[in-house]
Image: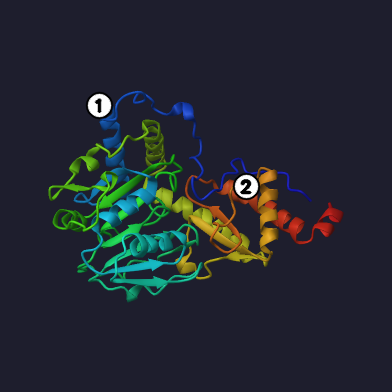
Amino acid sequence: MTPQIKPANPNFSSGPCAKRPGYQLANLSTETLGRSHRAAIGKNALEKAIVDTKTILGIPDDYRVGIVPASDTGAMEMAMWSMLGERPVDVCAWEAFGQEWLTDITKQLQLKDVRSFLADYGQIPALEQTDPNHDIVFTFNGTTSGVRVPHCDWIADDRQGLTICDATSAVFAMEMPWHKLDVITFSWQKVLGGEGAHGMLILSPRAVARLESYTPSWPMPKIFRLAKGGKLMEGIFEGSTINTPSMLCVADYQDALDWVQSMGGLQAAIAKSKANLAVLEDFIARTPWIDFLAQDASIRSNTSVCLSLDLTPDQVKALIKLLAEHKVAFDVGAYRDAPAGLRIWCGSTVEASDLKALLPWLEWGYQQVKTPATAEAQA
């Protein structure tokens, strides 16, 4: 029979992600709107977002945190264009965005001394094969594959190269070993459900030293420039952003930061995401026709949870359409380059009660598309 209870919030997209529980647009602080972002009121709002990010995440005092254009992609490309080329590069990729960074490095920057360590969706390469004397580029959590790094013990404390980490669907949901990471990027619209177009760039002292000692051989677009005259452009990390930011998006991000603080901080956000994953783990353990794309629990994401089903690709599409038509789950299809399946966001902006309400609909929807004639007769 058709289930009767629907999720209160059917938004399970893996980016942009669900807004925080209780979110109201009318509650945003809007006094910065219509003002210059370079005026004191705008600069103070940007700087507060930077300071609060650093405080909540426990980022070391000597790391810089900046707001940059073009979401996580902009932050990653800014870092790669500004820092790579001084030494060999190792790229670890096991999903779409890791493959994009590899393409940038080999096809756009055209670096020659590059090694790639690759794995299929649902798996992860042997990360310990990377060389600490090389720069290392990797995703912390594969948003399109549901696979995360299990730990960072493979990163040497005495490394000579930089670790450049795309952490967009990990920050605020997973423990980040900051001392192992030199460049960290993320976007507001992932774990905190913020609005798009802005990225966060976090630099260790070692990354700053690279920027101040190395000048790439290629032309550097203004939007990518992080250093001038051999010195870091400190203003970027103090609220003087490159290009014009949306102050409405900044207010929205600040609202999400305040919410994390109100719920108990970073550890509470991480715990909620893990509890959400546990809801799906329990369901999958007792349901034979669905499984995690990441079979190994040690590398399984607790945010972008990717699932495989005992269905054909066309049947999976039919299921996704059916869930959307009944307004119980929007945007839950696997990433376009990933194997056919579902991708359900389990970050802390999602409520466990909504995930629990979704499960009977998954069972019902599966029966509808697997054996439609039988399902119609039973109904």
In front of the other: 213 or 372:
213
Measuring 54% from the left and 62% from the top, which residue is drawn there?
338
Q: Nearer the viewer, mark 2 or mark 1?
A: 1
- Residue 172 drawn above or below residue 290: above
Amino acid under label 1? Answer: Ala
Secondary element at tag 2: loop
The structure residue drawn at horizontal position 29% and vertical position 57%, both measured from the top left corner, is 80
Which residue is identified by label 2?
Answer: 329
- Calculate the distance from the C-alpha at mark 2 to the C-alpha at mark 1: 42 Å
Residue at 70% x, 59% y is 315
The kind of secondary structure element at disc 1 is loop
Relative to 196, say whether 34 is above or below: above
Q: Name the spot of residue 290 as percent of width and height, x first.
A: 64, 64
Q: Is residue 264 above or below residue 375?
A: above
Would residue 139 be visible to someone looking at this image? no
Q: Which residue is mark 1?
A: 39
